[in-house]
Amino acid sequence: MIYKKIISLCIFCFCFSLCFSQDTTSSDGLLQIARKAAFDEKNYSKAKVYLNRALTISPNYSDIRIFLGRIYSWTNHYDSAKYCFDYVIKNKPDYEDASLAYSDLEYWNDHYANGLIVCNNALQYHPQSEELLIRKTKILRALKNYKQADSTVQFILKLNRNNTEARSLADKIKEEAAKNKISLEYDYVYFDTQFPNPWHLVSIDYGRSTKIGTVIGRINYANRFAENGLQLEADAYPKISKTFYSYVNLGYSNNNQGVFPTWRGGFSLYANLPKSFEGELGFRYLQFTGTPTWIYTAYLGKYYKSWLVGARTYIIPSTYTNTLSVAYIGTARYYFSGNADDYIGGTLGYGISPDDRSVASQLGTLNNQLPTYKFGAFFKKKVSHMNVLAIDATWYNQEYLPSTIGNQFQIGISWQFRF
């Protein structure tokens, strides 16, 4: 009986080893070994050796040649990569993977015209390929052909409204497409106990897209604490690369009543991350009177189907307060059509945000350790070709003095005209 068990175990081990042994005699086996070398070991030289050996067995095996071309792309051997992709497309013009790899190569090397030709040729065979259309959109955006880029990305969203990468691209194209925009915004804040008079904030701004990115000038008027104040602000969104862009803010007010901080500033570095994620790291600077307040912020967001969800934190170091102060804010945005300007959403948070212009001046008067809870909702809709309406409302429950709690209600409306 024991011999039968030993024999069965030996047979199992032999079969197991056959299943997991490396096949170096067939082109398929060599392709699998090459993938392991490239992805698991990051050994591209080793992968190329296996792929070239596989091509001696099957010279017209398209997947092998495409993968070899991608490795040449990753190792900056662009002419060799082009040769691989051209070889496949010449023999199989409708082979989509070859066109995807070729367009990636041209896009990342700023050869946008060639990349567009590759995409358009492939789309003749695959007119509804979302992957090809995404690549075409990116190239058109890089060429600053925003009209065609928007048309292409809207077509993707008609095919699949849950395409998160297309949704993210649509947002960015909308911002870049309009060279000029004028916005008018009004916020009203009512307090049930903390202050006897409501607050009013009116802002008007003009923004323009430039070669370095969008630049915005803004004039803010507010009536707070029964006092009036004016503030001048400038925002800029400089582009750094295809992955990174930044935000720079500077504001000044000459009033001394705390209606606005005397100085405000800010900087953030944004990143378009893989898997439809986006991230931000930055700081905000507020100086009312005396010691200024530095506030550090981090954000992570993700596009998922028709949703954009994100979480943000603001941290005020203990250097400027009695103890560390932290604010947390979560947001969710649902796109209810294929347009990047059509969405509804909500906000749930703890603490006061320096980016919430309607109530940020409280950072100059509040003990930052006292809890503030907020819940808000917002709605944005494109009402005509170049006009966008936005409405938001927020409820705050705030302990503005020890053991003294009050509610405040904010409602805002804005109109933006692009031209």
Image: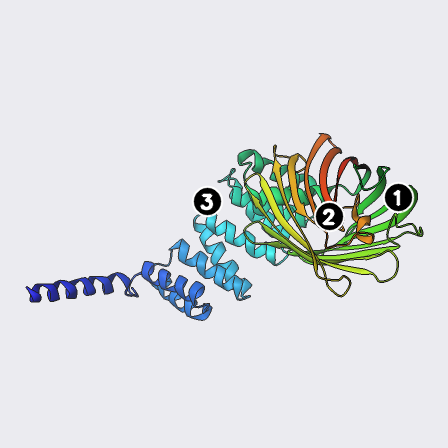
Q: Which residue is located at x 53 percent, y 45 percent?
A: 132
Q: Nearer the viewer, residue 24 or 274?
A: 274
Q: Earlier in the sequence, mark 1 or mark 2?
A: 1
Verify CB contact (< 8 Å) between mark 1 and mark 2: no
Nearer mark to the viewer, of 2 and 3:
2
- The location of residue 253, given as percent across then percent down, is 90, 51
Residue that numbered label 3 is attached to: 94
Q: Nearer the viewer, residue 32 or 87?
A: 32
Residue that numbered label 1 is attached to: 225
Q: Secondary structure at mark 1?
A: loop
Q: Is residue 356 above or below residue 334?
A: below
Identity of the amino acid at label 1?
Answer: Phe
Q: Quadrant of the N terminus?
A: bottom left
Which numbered circle lies on residue 403? 2
Q: Secondary structure at mark 2?
A: loop
Q: Residue furthest front?
A: 403
Q: Which residue is located at x 51 percent, y 41 percent?
A: 129
- The location of residue 133, given as percent across then percent down, is 56, 43
Distance of mark 1 from mark 3, alpha carbons?
Answer: 69 Å
Q: Is residue 23 above or below residue 253?
A: below
Q: Residue furthest top?
A: 383
Verify CB contact (< 8 Å) between mark 1 and mark 3: no
Q: Nearer the viewer, residue 213 or 343?
A: 343
Report crowding for label 2: few under 14, some 14 to 19, many 20 or more residues within 10 A (C-alpha). few
Q: Which residue is located at x 53 percent, y 54 percent?
A: 102
Quadrant in which residue 289 is drawn = bottom right
